[in-house]
Amino acid sequence: MNIYDISRAAGVSIASVSRVINGAQNVSEKTRQKVTEVIEELGYTPNVYARGLGRGSMQTIGIMCSDSADIYFAHAISYLETALRKNGYNSILCCTGYELRNKMSSFELLRSRQVDAIILAGSRYVELKAEDNQYILDGAREIPVMLINGILEGENIYCTLSDDASGMKQAVRKLRESGCRDFIYVYSSDSYSGRAKLRGLRMGCASSGVAEDALRIVRGKKDFQSIAALLEEEYEKRPFDAVIASSDTTGVGAVKFANRRGLSLPDELSILSFNNSVLAECSSPELSSVDPRLKDVCEKTVRRLLQLLSSDAQGADGRRDPERLPAKKLLLRPKIAERQTTRFLS
């Protein structure tokens, strides 16, 4: 069954059926009712793609993430799709991996599907080399691009992120206040978020009186066993009493190290990780973790996108009114979820 069958059954033109299906205003109420009754009677379902082209909107948002197996990204995707679905939007997901060429091809694939906007979930989409971000800047000239947990300056690009530098600075201060003196920071990524954490780490040490020789920064694989082995090597060189981990995955590796070494948590060793995911609560003992408020970040991303796509964002001349658009950047302040691996003062 197709639009021609509906036209014959309702006794109206194909153009009238198309206008009813696409929600156009220039159709009489009598014609609208007649076409609607035939559609319901025959059980016709309009083709989404054709309908989207007719309305100028696919009601579909593209989402790109590096790795859906990562618990952080898995939750981000869930939050985004739930919020979009509640507002009548579908989504197309591309898991790109970390290679630039795959990111670029996924971005072009989503553009070819006529999505209304693209959400880049994760800070790994902000490349160190400016020229490697050009494909995003070019694409944003046609459709809005929403960036989660990263900042990229450009027309039609909107960023929502947790202030990781502030969260890290707060983490160092609270560990220092709890009596920690010898710090080691373990990380696995030089992404935008990773660089922000390193910046906050140094700010926190400077403002809390942590001497340069009392801080070690080491990079390892994002794997429990590898992190545990790395910390064992570092502890043999010189003991430490505080581990700051760039993710909960890395934090679990630190807990494994402490358990194998026979170190009491948090009396002999404090551990503070990032992301406040389910891994932090499943760890034994449970991990204290900086909460980047991922759900809030994702929901606010969708809210800002809907504001951008809304007709309310258009001025009288049909162009976007800058005063009705969301801010280009929204920064959320993280908070610390204290559990059993720290002894913070109340």
Image (tube, grey):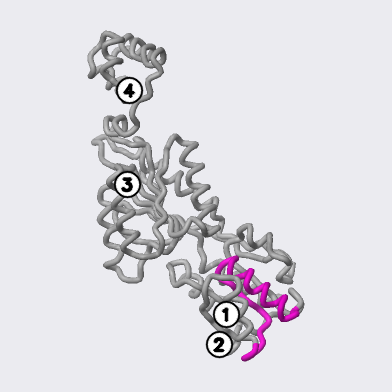
- Residue type at the position of mark 4: Ile
Residue 205, disc: 1
The residue that appears at 34% across and 59% down in the rendered structure is 103
Quadrant where the N terminus is found in the figure: top left
Amino acid on which the number 2 mark rests in the picture = Glu
Q: Is residue 203 left or right of residue 1?
A: right
Any magenta on residue 251?
yes
Q: Quadrant of residue 105?
A: bottom left
Residue annotated with mark 3: 322
Which class describes the residues within 10 Å of circle 3: few (<14), some (14-19), or many (20+)?
few
Element type at marker 4? helix
Name the residue nearer the viewer: 333 or 128.
128
Residue 7 sits inside the magenta stretch: no
Q: Residue at x 67, y 66 (%)?
A: 288
Give the Cα separation between the discs numbered 1 and 4.
Answer: 61 Å
- The answer to which of marks 1 and 3 sits earlier in the sequence is 1
Q: Secondary structure at mark 1?
A: helix
Q: Amino acid at mark 1?
A: Cys
Residue 11 image position (x, y, % from top left): 27, 8
Report the residue marked by disc 2: 212
Q: Which quadrant of the rendered structure holds the C terminus?
A: bottom right
Q: Which amino acid is tagged 3? A: Pro
Residue 312 position (above or below residue 293): above
